[in-house]
Amino acid sequence: MQKTNLKRADGPYSVGGPDRDFSISVDELLTGRKAGHLGLYHYGEPDSACDPVNGSDLWDRFVKNSPNYYQFRSENAIIPEVAGFVADLTGSRPVSLVDLGPGSDTSLQAKTFPFLSSVDRIEKYIPVDISAEYLREIDGAVSARYPNLDVSLQQRNYFTDAVSFNVNSVPVFLFLSSNISNLPEADRNGNYEKHLGRILSHFHSCMRRPGYLVVSQDSNQDESSLIGAYGDPLHVDFSLNVLHRIKRDALDEGCDTFDPESWIYQPEWFPERNLLAHSVYSAADQEISVLGRKYRVPRGSRLVLDNSHKYRVPDFLDVCRSSGFAPIKTFMDDSGRIAVHVLEAVV
């Protein structure tokens, strides 16, 4: 298969995807200015009964039913112990529990509820997610289980946006489900450290005072298990679904030649970069019009929609230290692949 070789056709055209930020991200992908940065847009919801966009539900089906996807089960097994450790750290101090990308109700119950049940004095629970559907689910589930808990929903891009909380409380940020692995962009030279450091530094600046970051990561380096997990048909359906969202939300009005069904998903492992790239290849010649520019996409063109970085634990902790976080304790699952770190913000 050939590398991406997209050519811009003559324009301008009618500009107008419903989601301009998404249109900009797709344009960056097509021009090659960024790659692997569409992860946040995978979790779309349908606008109608016949709308094929259904990323949130497809992801939930994948993590619940895939026999090959180990991350969800492995992390869930050690979260209760981590939650107890954090409860001991915070003691009787008031806590603002900031949950970055808590995800679906399934993830919420497995990863967040242990902290809500263990930490002694949570002043406010603050879920932050780009998905309005997930936030609605979270609000209902948390209110039903913890009716006296103060919940503040924040629909934001936690990779770039600030988070609001009471600065007189102890901030405890949760960033679980190995979401730190899905960097918003890939370094074409294989240097992920600066992008990882930028995200961690952003979290550090959001805290604005001493606090804790609980973050999980997948350190698996075994190609066969990685390809088996991400090549699962349920994950293939999930990965390709964002192409339907591109057609619905990002493209210019009247752009009818882009076919979400004419793409092939392929997970690709690059051991020298500790990177699993979620790539799609065009199965036909296509044209894509976005932000008034039309791009010709030859058959065989490759686009990297998302990345899953599999950091080695010592390397990951080195970046944490350089970003203002001091490691307190690391919890590993029985397989030695999933790590959950408790870090302290040094101010």
Image (cartoon, rainbow, N blue to C red):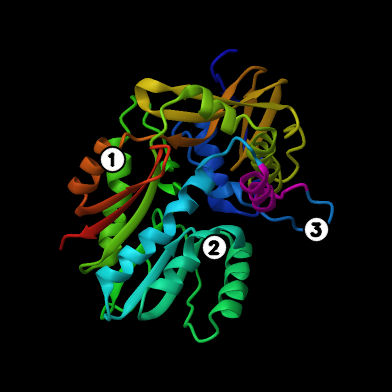
> Which amino acid type is marked by label 2?
Leu
- Neighbour tally class for label 1: few under 14, some 14-19, many 20 plus, Cα within 10 Å: some
**Residue 223 versus residue 319: which sits nearer the camera?**
223
Q: Is residue 193 left or right of residue 265?
A: left
Asked whether 60 falls inside the magenta stretch, the response is: yes
Residue 187: x and y in percent read: 36, 31
Q: Which residues are magenta?
A: 52-65
Quadrant assignment for the C terminus: bottom left
Q: Earlier in the sequence, mark 3 or mark 2?
A: 3
Q: Residue furthest left?
A: 347
Answer with left or right where residue 209 lies relative to residue 262: left
> Which kind of residue does numbered mark 3 sit on?
Ser
Q: Position of residue 11 (x, y in %)?
A: 62, 34
Residue 8 spot, x, y in % from top left: 58, 26
Which residue is tagged 1? Answer: 316
What's the residue at 45%, 72% (across, down)?
116
> Helix or strand or loop: what does disc 3 sit on?
loop
Are the residues flagged by discs 2 and 1 in contact, CB closer than 8 Å?
no
Mark found first going from the N terminus, 3 or 1? 3
